[in-house]
């Protein structure tokens, strides 16, 4: 048998390896020693030694972190302070490095190494200040290089541009550029019409405007809103995107004002910027129907309006900007939505333009607060459709039908209203039989979108199914056939997941699904047409037989995932819907058995579940999706900034992720493929249901995985807010429980995470759940509070006058539920060790004034007499800490039966940790003179 290696031996081995120059092996030895070592002084030494290894390995961030842990244990540890100063110097944080070195010198004034290091660092800081002082001349030099037409050195120009952008990212640098006539010079760069110089100017302006309202106002005045919108509409895609980014930053700065510490000063300079915001929005709206604007410029304008116009929160009562945009620009937005590609004089648009217009219209409609505002929206839409439909040639009617499609994909209520206008539905049906492909495409798409709406479904079933079947069977064009197929798929899935509500004959649904998969995998067909195959599957996968066949077809799944990366992002919702169906992650309630009996008696329809929708089948489908790479595909979708990623789409993706992490053994795979990272933004933005589902998925990962590995670096701190949201009262008991469990894991990792949890105001909610009737929730809350009690701020809460926190912990330590006793007594052991004043408070808060209340002494005695060694140890530690805290507390303990119990436990050789704590308690009683020393022990 191998001998057990101790922490001390590993430390010595690490020292020898370090001396030999094998720093990586030394680091591994120290790390292994840390995992075995519990004593705080020894751990501090190991952290200090690891810091030395990291310095040698040039991992300065980890060197600083380890040195800081050593300093937390001993603030006078000069080696740790010196090593941290070295790490901070390499990280560029010179002021903090100087502070550590000054501390070293104050602790050991005669140490020449410290003095020399401080002098050297002082010189470095002086040089840095000197460099900053000559920034003015450097700024001037950069602009000279960029604006000199004679300068032919491309590398030199690129370097000057990059330096200017980097300088603008820092507040001091941005102010230098601004004060050095930088805006006028940047305007000159924009006017050169050279893409590289325009990009440099726009990216530098972003740095100048970020978080600075007054500078943004000045720059907007100097450049002019019309110039910026003109740059947004240029053909060069990167320049247009950079202009969009600048305008977004300007909007944020004008809306929010200063984000920095000197916000009050900035707000005093600029009081109101709504006029400037309206000027910018007006120019964006004017860009939409402008024939000279590029297609991607138009998309960028729509995307920007989506982000800046609607209210961020329903709590903000002012929706005046939305109302103003509807009055001034609704018809301009509809101009984009009604564009028929390939028609004479049509606007240049991309595959995403109409979807972006639909999303913007939907956002504006959702931002309306009353019926009068919504009625005005409807009237404007109806007037626009009539203007193209009534008394117009075929081209006008096509524009009207295209507008209907756009509205049905966005604010569907408005779409339904215009669909009911006289002649619209008849025109759609007649144009479905057109011999011209472009006309047929517009009509069939409108029919498909109309089939979504229950109000129209019966009419279309009666009038459109036979027509769609004819088109599907006899059309020679795949682009038309695939759309007709989608229309049939939608009508065929009207029963949803109800197995008993089959719309088509047996086998028809499977045939449609097979054809959809065939088209989906056919790379000879363009992506814009293939995405309709996914639309069809989004409806057909309500049928469990279709789901089973789809997950068996790996080629079809990967073709679908590949489509999410295409330029036509309108496919995203269909992909998410298909995955929700395959994973059964839609909402479904178990029917009440009594209501079922009543329904049978009344001969009402009773929904039936498909046999292949049972849990075992769903679990197998999830595994096959994971193997096919579903997580990576969804992570890429979430990462992309696109209007097609609507809040509804985000909710569907959150549902899928929650289904993917349902089984603990699958969570590692989800994290490895980027699922953990993708879930964070999903949990912070979108519908309330979507955010909650994503937060619950994060909780499941945090409970069973190592959080530091699942969410590395700073990402772990971003997880706290979503987890805290699961504690809100409107969440379900399961969500509360999983949120508490996940926070328990995080709270046990570091003080910084505990502070983050405190900052998110989670402690009162955790405390509230300690009173919960459900025993598992109560236990989870108590365990969470146990870890939170390591924080000084939380410890102080247990001393609050009039609070029952401490009393509850003492009482829970005497409960029958052993797990609850373990959590509560562990909290008491920690509190009494870390915060001695709590020891004096325990006898005062739980003194048993009535027969129902157990005395604190009885609870402690019961812990010491427990058959569980773990409970005995926790009780012994609490008693030991209370004995050490104050003589009067020790007197109360010794005056009871505690003395006899401690005397017995002190001799128990089978439980050395309990015996040691009991011996220390007795030794303290001897020191106080409360008992006589035992002569034999003496």
Image (cartoon, rainbow, N blue to C red):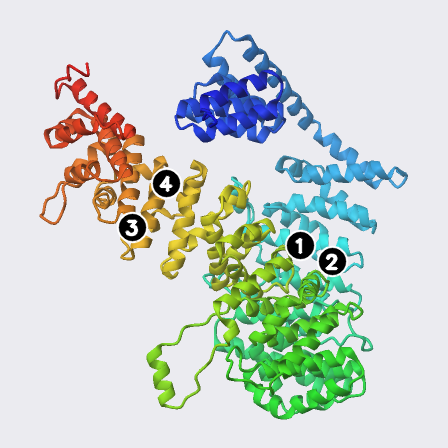
- Asked whether disc 4 touches disc 1, contact meaning CB atoms under 8 Å apart, the reply is no
Sequence-earlier tag: 4 or 1 = 1
| 236 relative to 167, above or below | below
What is the CA distance from the residue labelled 1 to the residue labelled 3?
A: 49 Å
Splitting the image into 4 quarters, where does residue 400 fall? bottom right
Q: Residues within 10 Å of mark 1 (few under 14, many from 20)?
A: many
| Residue at (60% x, 84% y) in the render | 491
Q: Is residue 323 in view from this perspective?
A: no
Q: Nearer the viewer, residue 170 or 464?
A: 464
Q: Position of residue 553 (x, y in %)?
A: 66, 67
- The secondary element bearing badge 1 is classed as helix
Sequence-earlier tag: 3 or 4 = 3
Splitting the image into 4 quarters, where does residue 541 fall? bottom right
The residue labelled by disc 3 is 770
Image-based side of 936 in relation to 220, left or right: left
Q: Position of residue 588 (x, y in %)?
A: 45, 72
The residue labelled by disc 4 is 787
The residue labelled by disc 2 is 232
| Residue at (76% x, 48% y) in the render | 199
Q: Depth-wise, is mark 4 or mark 1 nearer the camera?
A: 4
- Asked whether disc 1 touches disc 2, contact meaning CB atoms under 8 Å apart, the reply is yes
Sequence-earlier tag: 1 or 3 = 1
Q: Residues within 10 Å of mark 2 (few under 14, many from 20)?
A: many
Splitting the image into 4 quarters, where does residue 468 fall? bottom right
Sequence-earlier tag: 4 or 2 = 2
């Amino acid at each position: 048998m191998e001998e057990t290696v101790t922490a001390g031996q590993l430390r010595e081995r690490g020292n020898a390896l370090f001396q030999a120059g094998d720093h990586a092996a030394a680091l591994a030895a120290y790390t292994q020693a840390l995992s075995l070592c519990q004593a705080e002084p020894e751990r501090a030494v190991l952290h200090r030694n690891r810091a030395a290894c990291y310095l040698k390995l040039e991992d300065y961030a980890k060197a600083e972190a380890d040195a800081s842990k050593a300093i937390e244990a001993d603030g006078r540890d000069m080696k740790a302070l010196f090593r941290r100063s070295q790490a901070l110097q390499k990280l560029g944080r010179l002021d903090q490095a100087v502070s550590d070195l000054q501390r070293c010198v104050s602790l050991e004034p005669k140490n020449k190494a410290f003095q020399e290091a401080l002098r050297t660092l002082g010189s470095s800081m002086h040089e840095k200040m000197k460099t900053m002082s000559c920034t003015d001349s450097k700024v001037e030099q950069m602009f000279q290089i960029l604006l000199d037409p004679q300068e032919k050195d491309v590398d030199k120009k690129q370097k000057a541009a990059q330096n200017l952008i980097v300088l603008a990212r820092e507040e001091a640098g941005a102010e230098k550029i601004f004060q050095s006539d930088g805006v006028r010079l940047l305007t000159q760069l924009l006017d050169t019409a050279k893409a590289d110089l325009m990009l440099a100017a726009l990216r530098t302006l972003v740095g100048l405007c970020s978080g600075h309202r007054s500078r943004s106002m000045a720059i907007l005045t100097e450049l002019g809103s019309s110039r910026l919108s003109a740059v947004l509409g240029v053909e060069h895609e990167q320049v247009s995107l950079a202009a969009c980014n600048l305008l977004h930053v300007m909007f944020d700065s004008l809306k929010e004002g200063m984000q920095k510490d000197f916000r009050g000063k900035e707000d005093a300079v600029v009081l109101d910027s709504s006029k400037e915001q309206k000027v910018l929005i007006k120019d964006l709206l004017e860009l939409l129907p402008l024939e000279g604007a590029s297609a991607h410029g138009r998309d960028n304008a729509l995307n920007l309006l989506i982000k800046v116009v609607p209210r961020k929160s329903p709590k903000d009562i002012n929706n005046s900007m939305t109302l103003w945009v509807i009055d001034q620009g609704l018809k301009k937005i509809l101009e984009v939505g009604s564009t028929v590609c390939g028609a004479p004089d049509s606007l240049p648009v991309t595959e995403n333009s109409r979807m972006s217009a639909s999303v913007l219209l939907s956002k504006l409609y959702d931002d309306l607060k009353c019926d009068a505002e919504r009625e005005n929206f409807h009237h404007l839409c109806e007037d626009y459709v009539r203007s193209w439909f009534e008394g117009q040639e075929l081209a006008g009617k096509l524009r009207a039908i295209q507008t209907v499609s756009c509205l049905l994909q966005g604010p569907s209520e408005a779409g339904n209203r215009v669909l009911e206008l006289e002649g619209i539905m008849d025109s759609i049906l007649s144009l479905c039989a057109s011999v011209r492909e472009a006309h047929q495409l517009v009509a069939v798409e409108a029919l498909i979108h109309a089939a979504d709406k229950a109000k129209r479904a019966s009419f279309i079933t009666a009038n459109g199914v036979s027509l769609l079947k004819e088109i599907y069977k006899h059309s020679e064009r795949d682009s038309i056939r695939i759309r007709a197929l989608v229309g049939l798929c939608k009508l065929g899935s009207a029963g949803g997941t109800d197995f008993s509500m089959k719309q088509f004959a047996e086998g028809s649904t499977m045939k449609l699904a097979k054809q959809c998969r065939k088209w989906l995998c056919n790379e000879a067909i363009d992506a814009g047409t293939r995405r309709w195959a996914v639309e069809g599957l989004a409806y057909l996968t309500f049928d469990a037989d279709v789901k089973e066949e789809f997950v068996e077809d790996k080629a079809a799944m990967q073709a679908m995932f590949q489509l999410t990366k295409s330029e036509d992002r309108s496919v995203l919702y269909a992909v998410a819907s298909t995955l929700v169906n395959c994973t059964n992650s839609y909402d479904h309630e178990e029917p009440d058995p009594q209501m079922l009996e009543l329904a049978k008696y009344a001969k009402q329809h009773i929904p039936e579940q498909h046999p292949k929708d049972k849990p075992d089948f769903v679990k197998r489908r999830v595994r096959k999706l994971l193997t096919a790479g579903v997580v990576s595909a969804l992570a890429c979708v979430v990462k992309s900034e696109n209007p097609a990623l609507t809040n509804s789409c985000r909710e569907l993706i959150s549902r899928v992720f929650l289904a993917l992490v349902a089984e603990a053994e699958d969570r590692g795979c989800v994290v490895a493929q980027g699922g953990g990272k993708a879930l964070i933004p999903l949990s912070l933005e979108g519908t309330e249901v979507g955010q909650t589902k994503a937060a619950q998925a994060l909780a499941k990962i945090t409970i069973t995985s190592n959080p530091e590995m699942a969410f590395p670096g700073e990402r772990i701190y971003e997880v706290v807010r979503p987890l805290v949201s699961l504690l809100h009262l409107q969440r379900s008991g399961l969500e509360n429980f999983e949120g508490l469990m996940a926070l328990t894991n995080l709270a046990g990792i570091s003080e910084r995470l505990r502070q983050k949890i405190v900052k998110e105001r989670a402690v009162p909610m955790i405390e509230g759940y300690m009173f919960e009737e459900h025993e598992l929730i109560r236990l989870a809350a108590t365990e969470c509070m146990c870890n939170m009690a390591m924080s000084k701020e939380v410890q102080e809460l247990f001393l609050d006058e009039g609070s029952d926190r401490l009393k509850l912990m003492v009482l829970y330590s005497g409960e029958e539920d052993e797990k609850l006793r373990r959590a509560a007594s562990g909290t008491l052991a920690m509190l009494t060790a870390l915060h001695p004043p709590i020891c004096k408070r325990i006898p005062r808060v739980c003194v048993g004034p009535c027969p129902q209340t157990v005395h604190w002494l009885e609870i402690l005695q019961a812990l010491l007499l427990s058959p569980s060694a773990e409970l005995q140890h926790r009780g012994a530690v609490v008693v030991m800490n209370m004995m050490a805290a104050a003589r009067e507390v020790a007197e109360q303990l010794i005056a009871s039966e505690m003395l006899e119990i401690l005397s017995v436990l002190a001799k128990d050789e089978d439980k050395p940790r309990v015996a040691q704590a009991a011996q220390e308690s007795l030794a303290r009683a001897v020191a106080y003179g409360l008992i006589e020393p035992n002569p034999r022990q003496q």
